[in-house]
Every structure is written in structure tokens, then in C-alpha cells.
Amino acid sequence: MRIINIIALCAMLMISTFAVAQDIKTDHDHAIDFAKYRTFKWIKEPNPENPLMKQRIMEAVNAQLEAKGLTLAAGNADLGIAANTATRQEQTLDSFYGGFPGWGWRRYWGGPVVVDTYEVGTLLVDLFDTQNKQVVWWASASDTVSDKPETNSKNLDKAVEKMFKDFPPKSARKTD
């Protein structure tokens, strides 16, 4: 019986880990040759609810772009960065007696249901070609917001790193 409880606990922990995993999305203009971009500047700074996160976001994005060989410019630049943040509340409903698939446990007697409310934060980053003012690259990252600032900082760094993992995109595709 004890082994079943341990397996059930491990299964619940794995499920909860998957539920709060970062959601990263990116897209780019496939006709652009990103090799032509050498410099970047901020054209719209993020405005998160926590003002301390603003600098952390900017530093994380700057670090990723600089690691890719781009240089932060004070004046004219090839790329302009615009970043936005948003938060929303989400809820999950969980019933311990809801059962695990295939185990045959059921909640016939209407066992307790727990409502878990949590906050999800989203960071959006757009890169613009400053010559034609068109978006050439876009990314978003969503993750659960923690009550601990240190955790949020670590999650931010991981999210921005994942956002820029494949930046710059491979060279433009050939058109016939």
C-alpha cells in the first residue's frame, strides 16, 4: 500500500510540473536575412507591474542579443526592440478522489474539490527593422508567477534564453 502512495505522489508531482512549464513561442519574417543586423536599441521598454523586473527584462534581452554578436547602440541601430508584459489569473480544479486513469478509483461520494488560483505572466518581445519599421522577429514566453522574486528572476532568465535560442533564424529561404 505504501508503494502505491509513493507512486501516486510522484505522478501528481510530475503532472503539476508539466502544468507550470514555460510556454515559449517565436516567429520571424522568413524573407529577411538576419545577418545584416549588427546593432539594436530599445524603442519601447517593458512596463511590468513590478518595476524592478523592468531592468531585469532589459538586461536579459540585451545579454541574449549581445551573445549572438549584436551590439547595443545609443543612437541609430539596425533593430529596434519593443517589449510588453501582462499577467492573468488562471485556476485549476483538482479532486484528490478524482482517481488516476486505469486505477479504478472514483469519486462516487463527491469528494472534496480544491480550486487553485495562480498568476501567469507573459513577456512579449518584438524586433523591428528600424529602416522600414516592420516586425521581423517575435517571441512570447508565459510562465507561472511566483511569490518569490528570486524564482521569478531565474524563470525570466530561462525564458529569455529559450526565446532567443534559435536567434538569429537561419538565412532567408530562396524564392524561385
Image (cartoon, grey):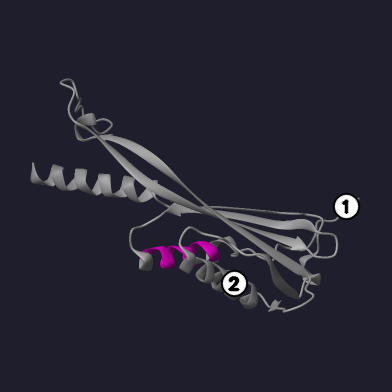
State the quadrant of the N terminus: top left
Position of residue 145 in the picture relative to residue 162 (left or right): left
**Residue under numbered circle 2:** 64
- Residue 84 at x, y percent in the picture: 59, 56
Say what amino acid the circle numbered 2 marks: Gln
Q: Is residue 40 left or right of residue 54?
A: right
Could you tell me which secondary element the residue under label 2 belongs to?
A: helix
Q: Is residue 170 above or below residue 106?
A: below
Q: Position of residue 78 (x, y in %)?
A: 79, 71
Q: Secondary structure at mark 1?
A: loop
Residue 120 in the image: state x and y as whole percent: 44, 49
Which residue is pictured at 62% across the width and 65% down the height?
Answer: 45
Task: Identify the main secondary structure in magenta.
Answer: helix
Residue 136: x, y in percent? 75, 58
Of the numbered discs 2 and 1, the one sitting upstream in the chain is: 2
Q: Nearer the viewer, mark 2 or mark 1?
A: 2
45 above or below 110? below
Disc 2: CA contacts within 10 A as few (<14), some (14-19) or many (>=20): some
Magenta residues span 151-160
Residue 82 left/right relative to 133: left
Say which of 117 and 137 sits in front: 117
Q: Residue at x 66, y 65 (%)?
A: 167
Identify which residue is drawn at 9% across, 45% down.
2
Crowd around label 1: few <14 · some 14–19 · many ≥20 (10 Å): few
Mark drawn on residue 175:
1
Q: CA distance from mark 2 to mark 1?
A: 30 Å
Tell whether position 110 is magenta. Answer: no
Q: How many marks?
A: 2
- Tell me the kind of residue under disc 1: Thr
Outermost right residue: 176
